[in-house]
Amino acid sequence: MTSPLQHLQSLPSWLAGRVAARGRGLVADAIAAEGLKLMQHAVLAATAEYGPVAQADLGRRLSVDPKDMVGILNHLQQAGLVLRTPDPADRRKNAVTVTPEGAAVLRRCAALAEAANNELLAPLTPDEQTQLMALLTRLHEAP
Amino acid sequence: MTSPLQHLQSLPSWLAGRVAARGRGLVADAIAAEGLKLMQHAVLAATAEYGPVAQADLGRRLSVDPKDMVGILNHLQQAGLVLRTPDPADRRKNAVTVTPEGAAVLRRCAALAEAANNELLAPLTPDEQTQLMALLTRLHEAP
DNA sequence: CCAATTCATTGGGTGTCCCAACGATAAGCC
DNA sequence: GGCTTATCGTTGGGACACCCAATGAATTGG
């Protein structure tokens, strides 16, 4: 029985942080080939998935600060991957949509991101990968 | 069969990142009661575990940038929790050690950090917690 | 003895996250 | 109708984590 914090590195929060950092790095390097940063890619993917959506909604779904969302969408819009249209039903909102070019970039990023995730999970068997995903999903949705 | 990136939020790297972010927040809030930041606590714990150790060693073990290590140790030393002693065997190195006061703070932090981790893993059964730890450890050590 | 490396430190830069404010708009309540 | 309250996008400032590069001192290797 080891003392509680004699091995800080074996704390779940620490382990999860290290694994997440590695995953972040792998995905970031992968999609950098398409000229996108991590969060730009995430916002682009979420925009594609949730159709025309307000910025605040995107921020809540991805846990992105509204302040940062402005910069991310500015970049995506300037790159022609995304469109900000005033929402006629609520003139405070911007209805964000993906352009055909944005969809094409996203399609190419999908393969890259998936490959990066495969590399991240490579040390595990397929069964173990499924187990890990199930456990992480529980932790992510439960609280 | 869902398309690869139709659900970015179900990518392992994304899930791990969200879970890790929550764990980081829980632990940070917990040890804030002792006046320590996350990385200050990590460095203090690693210093206690690995005895007199050089700053570069600490940085490698915790994946902390040498630049940041300087600031963290400055703070810990100023708080009287840690000592930097010139290493007689290698005068380039600082032999970092924990003061009795540092050990006391660390002891109190252990309980706080453990409670935070218990809260993080609360949605899982003890068996599942063990499984998760084993899988994360594999991912952390394998590559 | 000389080249290559390591150590602590400093510098600059980017990205993520938190708190606060603003004008414009919308929603709820009396 | 009017009033308060809340939300939306945006801007601002600041803390912290991560990355790259460079310095002088000191150690190591051939």
Image (tube, coloured by chain):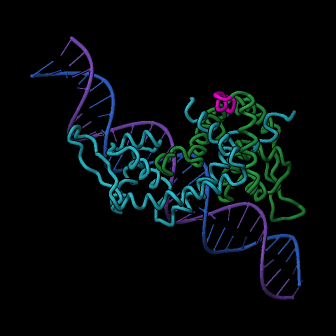
Chain colours: A cyan, B green, C purple, D blue
Farthest front residue in view = B1
The x and y percentages for residue B90 are 86, 64
Q: Is residue B114 above or below residue B49?
A: above
User: Image quarter for residue B93?
Assistant: bottom right
Left or right of residue D18: residue B128: right
Which of these two is toward me, B2 or D29? Answer: B2
Report the residue at 38% width, 40% height from top.
Answer: A57
Left or right of residue D8: residue A12: right
Report the residue at 74% width, 28% height from top.
Answer: B126
The x and y percentages for residue A73 are 37, 53
Which of these two is toward me, B6 or A47? Answer: B6
Q: Is residue B25 above or below residue A77?
A: above
User: Image quarter for residue C20?
Assistant: top left
What are the residue bounds of the magenta stretch? Answer: B117-124
Q: Is residue B107 above or below residue D9?
A: above
The x and y percentages for residue B24 are 62, 40
In the rendered structure, does residue A77 fall within the stretch colored magenta?
Answer: no
Left or right of residue A75: residue B125: right
In the rendered structure, does residue B119 fall within the stretch colored magenta?
Answer: yes
Tell how many labels. Answer: 0
Report the residue at 40% width, 61% height from top.
Answer: A104
The x and y percentages for residue B36 are 66, 39
> Quarter of the image containing the C terminus of chain B?
bottom right
